[in-house]
Image: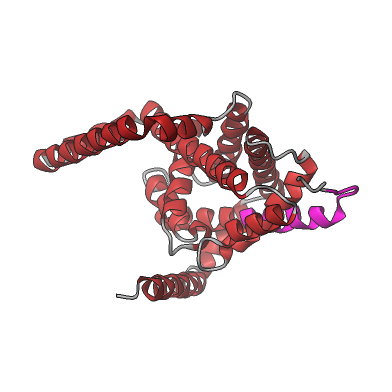
Amino acid sequence: MNWTLLKNVAKWVWLCAIVIFSIYYAVNKSDLILQALSLLSWEILLGVFFLIFLAKLCLVANMWLAASHFSINFGWIDCYRIYNLTQLAKYIPGSIWQFVGRIAILRERGVAAQNIRDSLLAEHLWVMASAAVMGVVLIAASQPDLLHLWFDNFDFNIRLQWVLVGSALVIASAIAVFFLRSHLLRWFLKLRPPVLAMPALLFTWLFLGASLWVTMAPFAEPSPPLAFVIGIYCLAYVAGFLVPFAPAGLGVRETVFALFLMPFINVDIAVLLAAINRILYFSVEIVAVVFCFRAKGFKINKIG
């Protein structure tokens, strides 16, 4: 079976489905959309834009820290430009083009392939791991009833199977580490984040979660806890990253938003707010790229 062809077909089918759904939703829910937009003032939308922009700056800081961690000595402005110039490529079907662009730029600047590999892996591992941990912790802390409901309705046999599978994976991992510890363990420990990466990641998710939460105020009474919405955003980000046929998690992230917000607001409003957040997120990325070309004194010295 040609898996590459199958993946490419899946990506284009997914994109077409997103476009068709967006057109259908806009046509059939036009009155609701206009009514909802009338409740979102320009101050709210500007605030969301600003929060997302702050989160993107934190992600640039995360890239800078990962690069520095592996002896790629670029300035923060350099990292800002490299990060944002390559980020738009994630919307191209394939889910790899932002990495390809980053690698090409760094190789052109003379950075060793091993340092590029390790810095990219560390950067995205820190982002995904922090999102997964924060998502589970914040949702469990703010809405513990959701976990109880999930656990109570989860078949015991299925749970047992998951426990057995998980145990087998842990044992297999332990054996692999035991036999490869002299090399693998040292390399894995190198990927651990420095202390300065913690606040950068924390504020990334705080700003992104708040960007969704502030748009809910006119529609939810009372609004869900901020911690819960941040947790939703974290898990939605991870889900979007893990689905290979959804460029930039398009459609996946919004689906997770809508599913988790349904207990608090109407499902149509949840879908609309998720779409608005995506549009503003993309707008921030466009503006960030414009700033790249406006930056003064941008220079990357070749590293031998």
Q: Residue at x 86, y 54 (%)?
A: 294
Relative side of 281 to 175, left or right? right
Q: Which picture quadrant has residue 217?
A: top right
- Percent of width and height locating residue 153: 17, 40
Side of 181 relative to 84 (left or right): left
> The C terminus lies in which quarter of the figure?
top right
Where residue 256 appears, as percent x and y from the top left, is 41, 51
Q: Is 79 placed left or right of 231 in the picture?
A: right
- Whether the magenta-drawn stretch holds residue 296 is answered as yes
Instruction: Give the main secondary structure of the magenta stretch.
Output: helix
How far from the left and from the top, in percent, is residue 190? 53, 31
Report x, y in % for residue 120.
57, 46
Quarter of the image that includes the N terminus? bottom left
Q: Residue at x 30, y 36 (%)?
A: 176
Magenta highlight on residue 90: no
Q: Nearer the viewer, residue 277 or 27?
A: 277
Q: Residue furthest left?
A: 157
Residue 174 vs residue 160, the one in the foreground: 174
Q: Quadrant of residue 115?
A: top right
Seen from the viewer's position, the closer of residues 168 and 241 is 168
Farthest residue in the top direction?
A: 195
**What residue is drawn where x is 48% and y is 41%?**
128
Read off the magenta span: 280-299
Eyeballing the image, is 29 above or below 291? below
Q: Is residue 145 left or right of residue 284?
A: left
The reply to whether residue 236 is visible in this rendering is yes
Q: How is the image coloured?
A: secondary structure
Question: Is residue 78 shown above or below 195?
Answer: below
Total marks placed: 0
Q: Residue at x 62, y 62 (%)?
A: 89
Res 283 seen here: no
